[in-house]
Every structure is written in structure tokens, then in C-alpha cells.
Image (tube, rainbow, N blue to C red):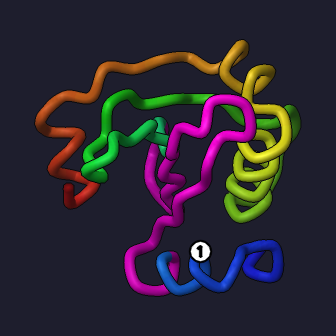
Amino acid sequence: MRDWLSPDQREQFDGSGYFEVVGCDSGKRYRIYYGIVPPNVCEIDDAGRPRMGLCFMPLGCLAAADVILAQKIALETDEHSALKVANRISLSRELLRSRSL
């Protein structure tokens, strides 16, 4: 998975346990977290605050690193299709705190 991250994403991931991607269709920013319960993808605003949790993943039983790699590729190459199947989850204060935001 790390080989597929850009240098900036790798640095972010190493320091924070998440990395950010830009959606190919909308230009929106998303933060993908590793090692937490869903939703592990959050749409974020210009100030870096989470706006909405998103839950989508590939079919099959995959390792966590493979799931977040698939999420990264989906948002960067076919954002519209990824969002079409994603469950949207309102982010509660407790959930935001658990993500250290």
C-alpha cells in the first residue's frame, strides 16, 4: 500500500495514521484513516475539518491496507462511482474526537 502513496501522503500517513486524497471529479478532499472502524473515509473542508463520513469498500475479505488502497484509487480515478455506493454518515462529536480532530 505504501508504494502507491505519493511522498506527501506517505509522510502524512507516517505521522498521523491517515492520508488525504483529492477526488478526481469534484476536487473535494478526503481523509482516509487506517486501523479504525468505519467510517474510515471523511470528506473534509478547506480548513481540514471533517464534513461527512463515508463508508464504502471493495467486495471480498481483504487486508486493511488493501481496503484503504482501493478507497484511495476509487476516489482518485472514479470518485462519482465510489460516492454512488457509499453510505454517508453524520459525524458526531464523539466520532470526531476518536479521530483526533
Residue 94 or residue 74, whichever sits in front: 74
Magenta segment: does it hold 36? yes
Q: Which of 89 and 5 is in front in this view?
A: 5
Question: Magenta span covers which residues?
Answer: 13-38
**Who's the residue at 59% across and 74% down the image?**
9
Characterize the local packing of mark 1: few (<14), some (14-19) or many (20 or more) Cα atoms within 10 angstroms.
Answer: some
Q: What residue type is labelled 1?
A: Gln
Q: Does the magenta stretch include residue 54?
A: no
Quadrant containing the N terminus is bottom right
Residue under pointer 1: 9
Task: List x then y, in percent, for residue 67.
Answer: 74, 51
In-front residue for pair 80/25: 25
Circle 1 sits in a helix, a strand or a loop, which is it? helix
Q: In which quarter of the image is residue 21?
A: bottom right
**Residue at 75% across, 22% down:** 80
Numbered label tally: 1
Residue 23 figure quarter? top right
From what the image shows, is residue 81 above or below residue 43? above
* Residue at position x 71%, y 13% in the image: 84
Image location of residue 12, percent across then percent down: 47, 78
